[in-house]
Every structure is written in C-alpha cells, then in structure tokens.
Amino acid sequence: MAKIKLTRPELKRQRDALDRFERYLPMLKLKQQQLQLTLRDVAEKQREAQAAVDGAENVFRAYRAVLADIAGINVRQLAEPAEIKKSTHNVAGVIIPIFEEVVFEQASYSLFATPAWVDRALADLRQLSRLKARRDVLNRQYELLKAELTKIIQRVNLFEKIKIPQAREHIRRIRIHLGDEMTAAVGRAKIAKAKLVQTGAIDAMTTYSPGETQEAVEP
C-alpha cells in the first residue's frame, strides 16, 4: 500500500479523486460498449469483403494465362487504382476511414487490334482492385478500433481494480487515523482537566472540554 499523508487535506484530495474516478468510469464503459459493437459490425463486413475478393480472384484466374500474350497492353497496370477516395467517420472518438470509390486511369487501346475478351478482363480486374481497396479500408478500420478498445479496456480495469479501490482504502485509513487522533485528544483533555481539578485550578463542575468542540471526522 502506498504511503499517504493521514491528514484532513489528504482526505479531501482522496475523496475528490474518488468522485472523478466514479464519474469517469461509466463514460469509459459506454465507450467500450460502442467500440465492441462497431468492431463486431466491421468484422462481419471484413468477412464479406474477403469473400468477395476471393470470388473475384477466381474469376481472374481465367485470364491469368492469356494476359501476357496481349502485345502492347498492360492490362494489370490499367487495372491498378489511380486513386482510392475515402472519407472519415468518428466512432466513440476514433477517426476511421470510410471507403468511397476507386478511380482508374482511362484505358486507351485499339478495339480492333485486341481480342474481344480484353474489355471483360479489364473490367473484372478493376472490380478485383475495387474490392481489395474496400477490404483494405475495412482492415484499417478494424486495426484502429481494436487499438482504441484495448486502451479503453486497460483504463476500465485500472479504474475498477486499482484506482477506485485504492482511493476507498486511503479514505478508510485516513478516517481511522483522524478518529484515533480525536479520541486521543479527548482523552488527554480529560486527564488534564482532572489534574487541574485535583489541584484546585478549576472547579470540578466546569463543563468545558476541548474534545467537545473539536471537529468530528466526516463520515
């Protein structure tokens, strides 16, 4: 147990700290719930996005062997995104990316000098790139939310298991110490009064007692 000052100012400081911890903890738990719900939703979207990528890659396999035979046209390069447009969204204080769309460079090649299936192959490959981009954004969402959830869980545990019990224990120890001090002071005052009575310094019927005016320890 950490050493603390067994004084009234420290008692107030510990009570103020306990009030802060108990006010902050429900907000942390609410944020934890929001993040957990959002993470489950993102995880489901991740699974769907990966399944879509797998399906598109199966389609692409039909073109894999013949793409190299197309002279002067780099279909793979034409299928690479020129830009991935994203927006942002705030989830429980976490800024996450939101997939919007993929922009491709304009394809320029002769329709008469290339096989008819090239257009279809390019469209399928671009769809694959689009699906991969969406999946990657979802993966990034999950990473950011997961990292924040880990921090929030650590804070909840810190407050619940350490800070709040520690503050309560400090308050208990300080109250006991202050109570003992007051009891001892009253006892000393009674002894001193009794001696004064014996010596005749004061009348035995004097009702004044220091213990009666000393401030009681707050519950």
Image (tube, rainbow, N blue to C red):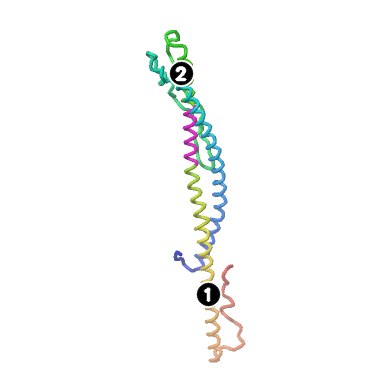
In the rendering, at what x and y percent does residue 117 appear? Answer: 47, 14
Front one among 29 and 40: 40
Give the mark nearest the N terminus, 1 or 2. 2
The amino acid at mark 2 is: Leu
Q: Residue at x 44, y 8 (%)?
A: 112
* Whole-number angstrom distance, CA of label 1 to CA of label 2: 85 Å
User: In the rendered image, which quarter contains the C terminus?
Assistant: bottom right
User: Can you say whether 28 is above or below 212 in the image?
Assistant: above
Q: Quadrant of residue 37?
A: top right
User: Can you say whether 122 is above or below 155 in the image?
Assistant: above
**What secondary structure is the magenta-colored segment mainly?**
helix
The amino acid at mark 1 is: Asp
Does residue 39 appear to the left or right of 70 in the view shown? right
Q: Are marks 1 and 2 in contact (CB under 8 Å)?
A: no
Q: Is residue 9 magenta?
A: no
Q: Give the mark count.
A: 2
The residue carrying mark 1 is 180
Magenta part of the protein: which range?
A: 131-145
Q: Nearer the viewer, mark 1 or mark 2?
A: 2
User: Can you say whether 115 is above or below 197 in the image?
Assistant: above
Q: Is residue 137 magenta?
A: yes
Residue most extreme to the bottom = 199
In the rendering, at what x and y percent does residue 191 appear? Answer: 53, 85
Front one among 121 and 28: 121
Helix, strand, or loop for circle 2? helix
Disc 1 crowd, CA 10 A, few/some/many (<14, 14-19, 20+): few
In the rendering, at what x and y percent does residue 166 appear? Answer: 50, 61
Q: Quadrant of residue 71?
A: top left
The residue carrying mark 2 is 122
Helix, strand, or loop for circle 1? helix
Disc 2 crowd, CA 10 A, few/some/many (<14, 14-19, 20+): many
